Amino acid sequence: MGQTDAFSTAIFLKMLSFFFLPKAMKLKQFILPLFLILLTFQNVFAQLTSNEIKEESLKELRTSLKTFREYLSIPNNGKVDEDIQANLEWCKDALESRGFKTKELMSGFVPHLFAKGTIDPKKKTILVYMQIDGQPVDSSSWNQESPYIPALKMKEGEEWEEINWNFLEGPIDPEWKIFARSASDSKGPSMAFFTALDILKKTGNQPSVNLKFILDFQEEMSSPELADVVAQNKELFEADGILIMDGTRHISNLPNLTFGARGIATATIRVFGASKDLHSGQYGNFAPNPVFSLSKLLAAMKDEEGRVLIPDFYAGIQFSEEEINSMNKVPEDLEEIESELGFAEAEKVGNSLQEALQFPSLNVRGLRAGWVGNEVRTLIPSEAVAEIDMRLVKETPGQRQIDLLKQFVIDQGFHLVEDEPTIEERNSYPKLASFEYRLGSDPFRAEMDSPFANWLKSGMNYVFGDQYINTRTTGGSQPMAPFINILGVPAVSVRIPNPDNSIHAPNENIRIGNYLEGIQTCLGILTQPFQ
């Protein structure tokens, strides 16, 4: 029997008994129990309407942004112990003040913060993942006093002008932005979730699910200890699904659920020339320049349309007709995207941006050889260095892709050394290089049609109707594989920040309209029943 049927039956029985009871017993036997039944089912069915979600989010926005400002003011470089501890303490207070019990989980001297609320065995349980750390900063490259002094800005022409935080006391323009490290990646999403919890409490509502949290303070370092933390605390993390509060929206900036993420592996290739830098006048045309060897090697890795030429790099990737249709539903105009990003023609790895994200990528993220600009010198550099990153999908695991890349370097005629080549090696091999690599986050992908996925989609639909999108995967990486592999549950990310947010770069920001919709998104999801 469903809750509605049970409620109707209880009311009917009480009404029937009313006609057969003495008057003196009616108040005690009918009115009071009926009141308790009504109160019980009021709590069962209490749910904010879509309009109430939007109204309450607006009412709470000003207070939330002020707290957000305080949150962003805490430096959060995951390589700095003091930063980790300061953010851990702030988040611990934030969760405990909202009724959650917290516990620090250590692995390799790196703390992680776990929290959980009251567990109702009749409800499903959701584990909420939050990234708290941010990329290192170069304060001199920011258009404000400091990345850790949040700046409220409005756009004047093509420039963003800083305005006083007192402007929040009046009407708040959704086009204003907050500039600070981790405004988007990812303190903004976590603060939106905290605010949704505040609104539920103030309106006398409860989340429709049990909530657990895991807060990660080294995500930007690929969460090196997270897998051990999960393995050591498997029972603690048991859940029916993982909600990831991290990631940027699709370029359309529509509210967005993303059902997977690419993994990452990195490599450093050093190509060696002479044992020291040489004068280009004295030794030009005689001493080989390693820049040309490295350039030829890199050029051999891709064709003119951007497809990777390393054998088997794309092996195993296939799409069903349903998956292609799902990707085609995402609103994308190729020419518009090219124009907005500022290049003439996209690479031909996929037929669209969405399709391109389903393949592994090969990127040269940095080059070094000699000096440039005011420091330029007439030298033949002794070495040339390329930093490579490869984004991975489920069908292309990191070790496989690294092995393919390494073999490709060897096949191009390079002799690989462990570190600096010896004199004997320099005298024996005309093409010398070293190859170092690191495996980061593994790729993952959740089903787009499952009870967990449908629960999330119902929450999005409740608030935004059909004005939201579902994307199969994101181009970036998230450390969810340990949870998925060990716990055996799906993970899906709620995308809140605006796509022009400059994450990882100077002048990272979040649009206030996106922040507001993030609060509404969390409320929509947390008010829907998860069966």
Image (cartoon, rainbow, N blue to C red):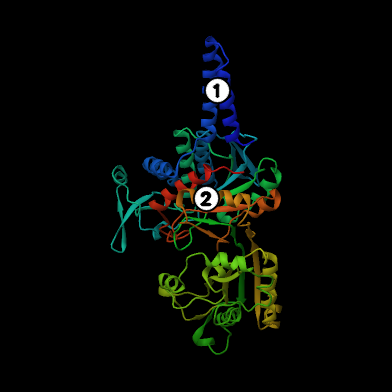
Q: Is residue 133 visible?
A: yes
Horizontal side of residue 3 vs 180, given as left or right: right
Q: Within 10 Å of the Cα at label 2, are there few (<14), some (14-19), or many (20+) other Cα atoms?
A: many
Mark 1 vs mark 2: in front: 1
Residue 220: image quadrant is: bottom right
Residue farthest to the front, as pictured: 19
Q: Position of residue 145 (x, y in %)?
A: 36, 53
Q: Looking at the image, is mark 1 or mark 2 earlier in the sequence?
A: 1
User: In terms of secondary structure, where does tag 1 sit?
Assistant: helix
Pointer 1 with pointer 2, Cβ within 8 A: no
Q: Amino acid at mark 1?
A: Met
Find residue 133 and name its label.
2
Q: Is residue 187 visible?
A: no
Q: Amino acid at mark 2?
A: Asp
Residue at 57% in and 31% down:
8
Q: Position of residue 113 (x, y in %)?
A: 58, 42
Tell me if residue 347 comes above or below residue 531 in the rendering: below
Q: Nearer the viewer, residue 384 or 177?
A: 177
**What distance separates the C-alpha of mark 1 from that of mark 2?**
59 Å
Tell me if residue 121 comes above or below residue 391 in the rendering: above
Q: Position of residue 15 (x, y in %)?
A: 55, 23
Q: Nearer the viewer, residue 448 or 399?
A: 448
User: In terms of secondary structure, where does tag 2 sit?
Assistant: loop
Residue at 62% in and 34% down:
120
Q: Nearer the viewer, residue 488 or 271?
A: 488
Find residue 109 and name its label.
none
Q: Which residue is the site of mark 1?
A: 15
Q: How many marks?
A: 2
Residue 125: image quadrant is: top right
Q: Give the position of the C terminus as an image quadrant.
A: top right
